[in-house]
Image: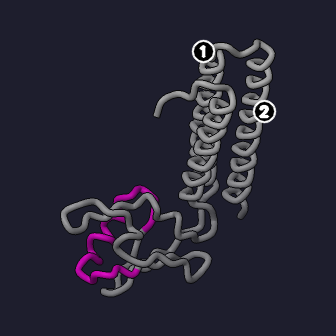
Amino acid sequence: MSTPDNLPDIQKHSKQLMQKAVDNTKRELATIRSGKATTSLLDTVKVEAYGQHLPLNQVGTVAAPEPRMLTVQPWDKSLIGAVEKAIMTADLGLNPANDGTLIRIPLPPLTEERRRELVKIVHKLAEEGRIAVRHAREDARAGIKKVEHVSDDDKRRTEVEVQKLHDDAIGQLENLVKAKEEEIMEV
């Protein structure tokens, strides 16, 4: 996609990029385990099926019937072993139990040490989101400088608007981090 060449389009484009960064960070944070079972915990698991690596939710139904239990019901019973193996090798610290038709995944309580490690991961993901937002701002600033036949006042106003979008996106990221951190540290 080419860079926009007028001020309103630059501003709109930077807003879209910043929102995309916030949404992506929100999705990534959802995959981090807190004390409660959530089906998004298994979103990163890829199962080797039919000669390719497929997301877990494309080979079976993932459910959270209890606060500390996830279940996976593969649609094709022949994939149950592959699904179980994928969950074990996904580096989520989970031990699935297979009864032949359903895979039960008990979620052990998090230790204090593991909670602190997860908080560090949350901060790392948030920093990646902040970097993406800053890149969007810098791209917008560079685009604003290149625009011709526009007054310096209009350029400055657009830069101020882009900075407001940046500050808003950073604020959203901070709120996401704070909420996720509280969720993880809650015993």
Three-letter amino acid code at the position of disc 2: Lys
Residue 183 pos. (x, y %):
70, 59
**Segment colored magenta:** 73-94
* Numbered tag placed on residue 92 in the rendering: none
Residue underneath mark 1: 146
Identify the element where label 1 is drawn.
helix
Residue 89 lies in magenta, yes or no?
yes
Q: Which residue is mark 2?
A: 164
Pick whichever, 161 or 108, lies toward us: 161
Locate residue 25 relative to residue 100 in the image: left or right. right
Q: Quadrant of residue 97?
A: bottom left
- Colouring style: one colour
Quadrant in the rendering for residue 169: top right
Q: Earlier in the sequence, mark 1 or mark 2?
A: 1
Amino acid type indicated by mark 1:
Lys
Q: Residues within 10 Å of mark 2 (few under 14, many from 20)?
A: some
Q: Residue 146 location in percent, x, y?
A: 60, 15
Residue at the image position 76 percent from the left and 14 percent from the top: 151
Q: Secondary structure at mark 2?
A: helix
- Residue sitting farthest toward the left: 51
